[in-house]
Amino acid sequence: MQDDDIATIMRALGHPVRLSILRILARQQRGECCCADVTEELPLAQSTVSQHIKVLLDAGLIERKPRGTRNCYIVQHDRLAALGSAYSGMLAGLGPVAPKLEAETA
């Protein structure tokens, strides 16, 4: 996963409502739900929920599946797993560097 992908996903996950939406979608028994289902669980207008869903879609964290006149959404678990791997690798690369001993520098 490239740094641009990581940054895009982290921006999408940077809002508590979007994290809530992902949790709502992830716990669905049938694996998907529509915007109205999500809106029922949040104290937000449908238009606001739709806007947050679009951000998650654009980041590739969820997928849209047309079901008749509605769109249902499914969490992209493989994308989240890839983020987890990339994120842990990125954090490991940001750790402190061991100081060089004088004998090593000479």
Image (spheres, grey):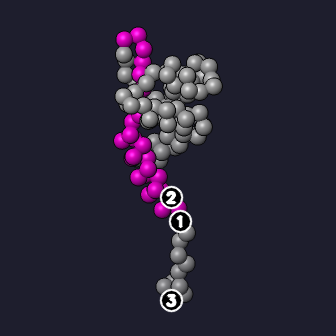
Q: Where is residue 1 drawn, in percent x and y?
A: 40, 47
Kind of residue indicated by mark 2: Leu
The residue where tag 1 is placed is 95
Observer able to see residue 2: no
As helix, strand or loop, the secondary structure at mark 2 comes to helix
Observer able to see residue 71: yes
Find out whether residue 81 is within the magenta segment: yes
The residue where tag 2 is placed is 91
Pointers 2 and 1 in contact (CB under 8 A)?
A: yes
Using residue 79 as the reference point, say whether residue 47 is left or right of it.
right
Q: Where is residue 73 drawn, in percent x and y?
A: 42, 26
As helix, strand or loop, the secondary structure at mark 3 comes to helix
Bounds of the magenta segment: 68-94
- The residue under the point 55% across, 69% down is 96
Using residue 43 as the reference point, say whether residue 55 is left or right of it.
left
Instruction: Point out the tag, 3 or 1, that comes first from the N-terminus.
Output: 1
Question: CA gap, disc 2 to disc 1?
Answer: 7 Å
- The residue under the point 49% across, 40% down is 9
The residue where tag 3 is placed is 103
Question: CA gap, disc 3 to disc 1?
Answer: 23 Å
- The residue under the point 41% across, 52% down is 85
- Which label lies toward us, 3 or 1? 1
Kind of residue indicated by mark 1: Gly
Q: Residues within 10 Å of mark 2 (few under 14, many from 20)?
A: few
As helix, strand or loop, the secondary structure at mark 1 comes to loop
Between 4 and 66, the one lying in front of the other is 66
Q: Where is residue 38 drawn, in percent x and y?
A: 52, 25
Residue 80's place in the image compared with 34, above or below, is below
